Amino acid sequence: MTPGSLGQLFWDRVSRSGDRPAQRVKVGGVWRDVSWRGLGEEVREVALGLLALGRQPGDAIGILSQSRAEWVRADFAILSAAGVTIPVYATYPSEILAYIVRDAEVRTLFVEDEKQLDKALAATAEMPSLDTLILIQGSSGAVGDTGRLKVLDWGELRALGRQQAQLRGTLEARLAGLRPEDVATIVYTSGTTGTPKGVIQTHSNHLAVLGMIAEASEIREGDVHLLFLPMAHSFGRMESFLGVRLGLITAFAESIERLPENLREVSPDFLCSVPRVFEKVYARILSGVEAASPMKRRIFHWALGVGRRVSRLEREGRPLPATLRVQRALADRLVFSKLRAALGGRLRFCVSGSAPLALEIAEFFHAAGILILEGYGLTETCPILASNHASAFKFGTVGRPFPGIEIKIAEDGEILARGPNVARGYYHKQEETAAVFGADGWFHTGDIGEIDRDGFLRITDRKKDLIKTSGGSYVAPQHIENLLKGDPFVSQALVEGDRRPYPIALITVNAEELAKLARTHGLGDKPAAELVRHPVIMERVRRTVDGVNVHLASYAQVKRFAVLPGDFTQEGGELTPTLKIKRRDVRAKYADVIESLYRG
C-alpha cells in the first residue's frame, strides 16, 4: 500500500529495511551505524513521550537545532504523533524565534543545547503558547529555575515514552488517521519586510516530491550521503526525507568546519550542497595551486586544460580522440584523482541547489571528473521544480521540470509553476498567499527565466528584491536598510548580496550629522567626500552596522560596507521621482565598489 503520510512512509521503511543501516553518526571519534529498526524504536519512544506530554493531533512542535541525527528522529516522532513540525534556524536571534513560536502557536520546542535553551528562555514572555522545552544535548538536571516552562532532556523524554505502553494504541491510531492533505510542517522563510512567512506544506506535497525524485534521479537504495545542510532549510529537509524514501544511509557531518574531514571519512556516493561550499573548495584549490612550485603549477594548468577539452566533448556527445584519452588518464593520475580523494573518492555526482551556481565552477569540477547537477525550487514548492540529471544536463541551466510539474513563462518573463508539490499558502497571511498562489493553480516564483528549445530552464534575473546568498539563505534587503537608516547618521543604504557569499552595504551619511561629528573631532572643514574616508567616520558607521547585525540572523548580517562620497540623488540617477532607490542603477554605478567588498 502506498504510504499516505510522511509518518507512514517512515514506518514502512523501518519494516522493509529492518537491520540495515539508516544513520551514521560520529561518536567519540568513531563513526557508528544505527539500523532502521533501532531508529524506529527511538522514534517511537520520542513520539510516545510527546503524547504523554499531552500533545494533540495538529499541535505545532518546533525544532531549534543545527542538523543532527536527533533532528530527523524528532521530526518523524512529531509526524508519527500527527503533529506539525516547525523548523527554526539555530542561528535565528531570540526575537525571530519568539515570532515564529508565537505565530505557529508552538506548544513544545526541541532545543539543541544549553546555548539554544538560554535563547528560548530569554524569550519566554514573548511565547505564551509554549509549555515544554526538550533539551537534545545535555542534562535537564543542570538547568535552574525556568518559571512556567517544563524542561526535559532527550533521555528523559525517551524514558517517559517507554513508560507509556498504554499509549501505543493511540499512537497507531493517529498514524493510521493521517490524510495526505493534512499539514505536515510549516516552514518559515524570509518575507520582503523581514518578517518570516510560514509556508504550509502538506504530507501529499512532500510525498509527491519524493516520488518525482525517485523516478528521475540516479540515487540507489543503500547509497551513502553526508548531510550537512541546515534542516530548517527545505533543501536539507528534503534530503533527510529522501533518505527514508529510498532507503539511504544518512551520515551527519559534525559541523561545516569539519566537512572536509568528514567527506574523506564517510566517502559519500553523492552530495547535496549549496553553491557556497563548491565556491570555497574551488577557491582553496586555486589558492593551493598558486602557493605550489612552478612545476606543480604547470602540471595543474596542463591537466585542467585536458579536463576542459574532455568535458566539452562529453557534453557535446562526441567521442574522445585516442591521444586525449591518454592525456586524460595521465592528468587524472597526477592531479584529479587527488582532488576527488579529498572529497571522499567515491562521489558519482553532486547536487547543487538553493542558489545559482557559477558556470565557471560547474565547468571546473566537471573537468576534474566531478559532475555537479544544478536544480531549482523554492520553499513554496517543497522545494523542487527542475533539475539537471546525469543522463541529461546542461551547465548554466537548472535543468528540465520534474515529471508531474508544469512550468511556463509569463508575459513579463516570470517563471510560473504548477504541480502537486506546490504548498498550500502562507500561514496567517491571506493577502500574500493570494498574491503568489494563483487561483488557477499557478505559483508565481518571483524569478525571471527562459526555456530553451531542449526544454532546459535558465534563470536570468529576480523579479523580487529578496536577496538569495550563494549559501542559499534568503535575505530581505529593505528590512536591513530600514534598520540602518534608523540611525540619523545614515542617510541612505543599499544592501547587496544576491548570489554572493554574504550581504554588504553601500551607505551614505547625513551631511549635517557628518559636519557635526567632524567639528567634534577637530577634523577641519574638509569636503564630505574626503571626510567619509576618515577612520573616525568609518568607526561611527561601523558601530551602526554592528548594532543592526545584533538583530539579524548570521547569514543576513552585513559583513562589509562602504561609505560613499555623496548621497543618492535624482540628479545623480540613484533615486526615482518618488525618492525610491533605483537598485539596478546604483549597482551599475558602484560596481567597482561592490566588487572590492567581495575581494580578499
Image: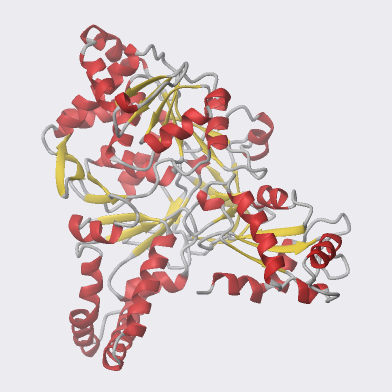
Rendering quarter of residue 511: bottom right
Q: Residue at x 27, y 14 (%)?
A: 172
123 vs 212: above or below:
above
Horizontal side of residue 589 vs 50, given as left or right: right
Say above or below: 486 vs 172.
below
**Residue 175 x, y percent position in the rendering:** 32, 18
Q: Point out residue 500 in the picture as x, y percentages from the top left corner.
A: 53, 63
Residue 203 coordinates in the image, percent (x, y): 41, 29
Q: What residue do we see at 17% from left, 80% from top? A: 333
Q: Is residue 420 left or right of residue 411?
A: left
Q: Identify the colour scheme used.
A: secondary structure
- Would residue 416 be visible to someone looking at this image? yes
- Along the line of sight, which residue is nearer the eye, 226 or 451? 226
Q: Position of residue 284 (x, y in %)?
A: 36, 72
- Count of numbered marks: 0
> Where is the N terminus found, in terms of image quarters?
top left
Q: Which residue is nearer to you in this view: 108 or 301?
A: 108
Q: Residue at x 20, y 74 (%)?
A: 337
Residue 468 sits in quarter: bottom right
Q: Residue at x 20, y 65 (%)?
A: 345
Q: Quadrant of residue 260?
A: bottom left
Residue furthest left as drawn: 19
Residue 404 in sight in this render:
no
Q: Nearer the viewer, residue 497 or 546?
A: 546
**Left or right of 386 on screen, residue 158:** left
Q: Is residue 119 above or below residue 567?
A: above
Residue placed furthest toward the top:
166
